[in-house]
């Protein structure tokens, strides 16, 4: 599968071949949705926590005797019926939101998402990507010359590059990550996918070899 290759000036310099096993997979939206839901659930941090009647302090004695007062019978002032009492069916920290997804399903959804980017012409391959200083202005100038101008962009680097990551951090519609950290949730969160040619080899080595 051939795709055009651009330089940092936005000029088309040639073509490169993409592995069909990764970028030529038929897309199943239901599987992608299932993987995205699991990723979002696994990232969820459970903070909200309410106390039930057994955890609220106080209420050790019966507020008044059972009969003869004319009032409703109560056993504790920490009942959910009382102000300051426990909460019924409130949010709890011990609730588990994580969802388990089979590794093969996760990998296949990953390949499907990459294939969808290619089919929709949302994949931009560069011959190289580098800047001398970690300046946001330099990264912005590069992106404005590419087909992804003024759109949200996920920049996938073959390895850690401090200058590129810091230069992308202040761009509202851009994010730079390493190829080893690439996942379905990040892919669908941005419209365009920008990567140097080296990144393709990293993805192939890491994800395709592990599939065998």
Image (tube, rainbow, N blue to C red):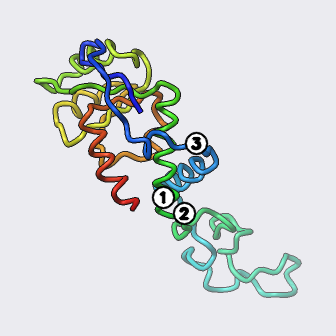
Residue marked by disc 2 = 99
Q: Nearer the viewer, residue 207 or 143?
A: 207
What quarter of the picture does the N terminus occupy? top left
Q: Quadrant of residue 194?
A: top left
On residue 42, the disc is 1
Q: Nearer the viewer, residue 95 or 4?
A: 4
Question: Element type at marker 3?
Answer: loop
Q: Position of residue 19 (x, y in %)?
A: 38, 41
Where is residue 42? Give x, y as percent: 48, 58
Q: Is residue 47 visible?
A: no
- SS at circle 1: helix
The earlier-in-sequence mark between 2 and 1 is: 1
Indicate whether 109 appears above or below 9.
below
Looking at the image, residue 89 lies above or below residue 55: above
Q: Are marks 3 and 1 in contact (CB under 8 Å)?
A: no
* Residue depth check, mark 3 versus mark 2: number of the one nearer the observer: 3
Q: Which residue does the image show at 47% across and 31% down from the upper left? A: 118
Q: Is residue 184 above or below residue 169?
A: below
Q: Which residue is mark 3?
A: 27
Mark with earlier residue (3, 2): 3
Characterize the local packing of mark 1: few (<14), some (14-19) or many (20 or more) Cα atoms within 10 angstroms.
some
Q: Which mark is residue 51?
A: none
Query: In this view, which residue lies farthest toward the left?
Result: 132
Which residue does the image show at 17% across and 36% down from the upper left? 162
Residue 186 x/y as whole percent: 43, 41
Cα distance in 3D space between marks 3 and 1? 24 Å
């Amino acid at each position: 599968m051939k795709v055009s290759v651009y330089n940092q000036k936005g000029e088309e310099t040639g073509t490169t071949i993409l592995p069909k096993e990764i970028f030529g997979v038929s897309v199943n939206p239901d599987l992608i949705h299932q993987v995205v839901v699991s990723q979002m659930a696994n990232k969820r941090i459970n903070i909200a926590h309410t106390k039930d009647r057994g955890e609220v302090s106080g209420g050790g004695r019966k507020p008044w005797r059972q009969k003869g007062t004319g009032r409703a019978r109560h056993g504790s002032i920490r009942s959910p019926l009382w102000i300051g009492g426990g909460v019924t069916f409130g949010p709890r920290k011990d609730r588990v939101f994580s969802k388990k997804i089979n590794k093969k399903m996760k990998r296949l959804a990953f390949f499907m998402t990459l294939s969808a980017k290619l089919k929709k012409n949302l994949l931009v391959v560069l011959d190289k990507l580098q800047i001398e200083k970690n300046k946001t202005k330099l990264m912005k100038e590069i992106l404005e010359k590419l087909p992804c101008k003024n759109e949200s962009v996920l920049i996938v680097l073959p390895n850690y590059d401090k200058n590129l990551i810091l230069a992308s951090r202040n761009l509202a519609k851009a994010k730079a990550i390493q190829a080893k950290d690439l996942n379905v949730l990040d892919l669908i969160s941005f419209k365009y996918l920008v990567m140097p040619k080296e990144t393709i080899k990293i993805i192939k080595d890491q994800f395709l070899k592990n599939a065998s």
